[in-house]
Image: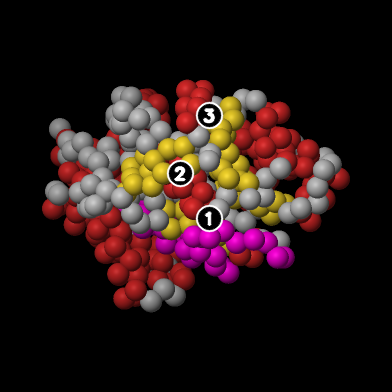
Amino acid sequence: MKAVHIGAGNIGRGFIGLLLSQAGYEVCFVDVNESLVSLLQQKGAYTVTLASSPHETTLVSGVSAINGRDLEQVAEAIASAELVTTAVGLSLLETVSIGIAKGIEKRMTRSSDPLQIIACENTIDGSSQLKDYVYTHLSSAICKKADQLVSFPNAAVDRIVPIQHHDDPLMVIVEPFYEWLVDRSGLLPGATEIAGVHYVDQLEPYIERKLFTVNTGHSCIAYLGYLSGHSTILESMENLAISLQVQHILEETGSILIRRHSFDPEKHSQYIRKILDRFRNPYLSDEVVRVARSPIRKLSPNDRFVHPALQGYKLGIEPQYLASAMAAALLFDYPEDAEAVELQEAIKSRGIHQVAAQITGIPEGHPIHALIIQKYLSLSSLRT
């Protein structure tokens, strides 16, 4: 079995590539980082170490790599694969869709074997979004044929992989916990299921549970930690005030999730405790500025703060802690993050009221907008 994985970064190697290799796939990585691709081509293997005691290490062998700029090579690899996965970030899905489309075109002329394409990104309906991009590059006839042979099941992925600093640039350290969920309803009849992946009939509740717990909590720690002068997630979680704030925000999003999806309250409380323990992993050293990066994207209407806040508001839940997290994100002024710089310049030129409304999509006059401004001014006063 052959899998093409697009995005050979730490998530790609330490999570998706590892699982695919363990499931029996021959993994071909695609990336535009020439030095990374060259190393993978030379060595054909890399190691993944668990951030735990003992530090269990796995050798992932028999891998290959292609430069993502060579669209002909990418298309050729996809034309002969059973599975294509991505871990590139939502903003790059449109870019990688070109090579995938060329691969599907080439495949259609040679084979009628089914192909699965799964976007392993931190977003809702990532594979569906990728499909939309891919189909813009295909003729109507190819699209019609692809509907019968190519599936784009949506997925939710969860594994913390911090910034890496090793002598061996291919080595990856990952947390022991992982979760890869795939929507079974998006598969073609008789499709092969990947060993190690959990297939579910309804994905939305699990995607929202992960997004509103792991992503919301992780980012909240980062923004509050940054404001408090902490450099790592672990150091931030050792700050009792931040730890309690994160617990409150997850209880708040938890109440929303329980109402929306009928989760068992006790089981969800256990899930929250598990997530908080993951954030406190002493063997992970994750930088606050890495987790906090791209505040404009994280404050967008369909992401980890605004989306649950608006859902909670509709359910009669006032999102006090989510508003605090959004206020902290609006104060993220790290000079080496392009979005943070853009955000702070916008606030200086147009004012916090207008910028908060524009970025979050929550209009001025809305109760949540007023709550965000209130929290922002409160946090700002503490910094001066």
First in residue order: circle 3 vs circle 2 = 3
Image-quadrant location for residue 225: top left
**Residue behind mark 2:** 60
Taking the spot 17% from the left edge, 36% from the top edge, the residue there is 229
Q: Are marks 1 and 2 in contact (CB under 8 Å)?
A: no
Distance, label 3 to label 2, CA atoms, is 13 Å
Image-quadrant location for residue 107: top right
Query: In the depicted view, which residue is nearer to us: 113 or 245?
Result: 113
Q: Answer whether residue 202 is magenta in the image.
A: yes
Q: Is residue 93 placed above or below 115 in the rendered structure? A: above
For the residue carrying disc 3, how many other residues have a C-alpha within 10 Å: few (<14), some (14-19), or many (20+)? some
Amino acid at the residue labelled 1: Ala
For the residue carrying disc 2, how many other residues have a C-alpha within 10 Å: few (<14), some (14-19), or many (20+)? many
Q: Is residue 179 placed above or below 74 in the rendered structure? A: below
Q: Image check: 163 left or right of 28? A: left
**Residue behind mark 3:** 41
Taking the spot 41% from the left edge, 66% from the top edge, the residue there is 257
Q: Position of residue 40 (x, y in %)?
A: 49, 31
Q: Position of residue 235 (x, y in %)?
A: 17, 44
**Residue behind mark 1:** 23
Q: Answer whether residue 265 is magenta in the image.
A: no
Distance, label 1 to label 3, CA atoms, is 21 Å
Q: Position of residue 182 (x, y in %)?
A: 55, 60
Q: Secondary structure at mark 3?
A: helix
First in residue order: circle 1 vs circle 3 = 1
> Range of the magenta residues?
189-217
Is residue 345 something one can see in this rendering?
Answer: yes
Q: Image check: 332 left or right of 97? A: left
